[in-house]
Amino acid sequence: MSKILVGAAVAVLASALVNSAAVAQQTQEVRVEAARIVKTAAGKAASGVEINDMSLSYRVSYAGLDLASHAGAMEFEERVNDAAHKACKEIGRQYPDSTPGDAECAKAAADKAMVKVHELEAAAAKK
């Protein structure tokens, strides 16, 4: 009976290790979040305008990229910049009167995400 329990415990532990490795593989991404201000006429402010902060985020994968190499790092940064542009463009499409414009929104979103990107690149270079 104890051999069965030990075997079951080993199986559970092995399964947990495999699952945690799979989760680690899936988290090889950085979140890019774009935000813009949308004004609506239905507000209760003194000016009669309600201000809402709209945001959209994309997850950008770096799985399969060698972040320690120049080419891998540049590809990752390009993916992040593309995601920032796409997110801001989509918010602008849905809310044409939102601010800031696409370019300024994309720069802010990419700059914020690049902090994490550069941390990951530095960690990869140390390995």
Image: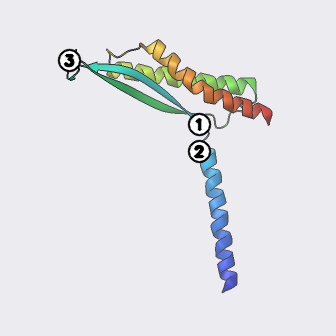
Residue at the outermost front position: 46
Q: Are marks 2 and 3 in contact (CB under 8 Å)?
A: no
Question: How far is disc 2 from disc 3 in space, using C-alphas?
Answer: 46 Å
Three-letter amino acid code of the residue under disc 3 = Gly
Residue matched to label 1 = 29
Q: Are marks 1 and 2 in contact (CB under 8 Å)?
A: yes
Labels 1 and 3: the sequence-earlier one = 1
Residue 16 screen position, x and y as percent: 63, 61
Could you classify mark 1 by the number of other residues whose Cα lies within 10 Å: few (under 14), some (14-19), or many (20 or more)?
A: some
> Could you say whether the residue bearing mark 1 is in a helix, strand or loop?
strand
Q: Are marks 1 and 3 in contact (CB under 8 Å)?
A: no
Three-letter amino acid code of the residue under disc 2 = Gln
Q: Residue at x 59, y 42 (%)?
A: 27
Labels 2 and 3: the sequence-earlier one = 2
Q: Nearer the viewer, residue 103 or 38?
A: 38
Residue 19 screen position, x and y as percent: 61, 56
> Could you say whether the residue bearing mark 3 is in a helix, strand or loop?
loop
Could you classify mark 3 by the number of other residues whose Cα lies within 10 Å: few (under 14), some (14-19), or many (20 or more)?
A: few
Residue matched to label 3 = 48
Residue 93: quarter of image: top left
On-image quarter of the C terminus:
top right
> Could you say whether the residue bearing mark 2 is in a helix, strand or loop?
helix
Question: How far is disc 1 from disc 2 in space, using C-alphas?
Answer: 8 Å
Three-letter amino acid code of the residue under disc 1 = Glu
Could you classify mark 2 by the number of other residues whose Cα lies within 10 Å: few (under 14), some (14-19), or many (20 or more)?
A: few
Residue 14 screen position, x and y as percent: 67, 64
Query: Of circles 2 and 3, which is in front?
Result: 3
Q: Residue at x 63, y 28 (%)?
A: 117
Question: How far is disc 1 from disc 3 in space, using C-alphas?
Answer: 41 Å
Residue at the outermost bottom position: 1
Residue matched to label 2 = 26
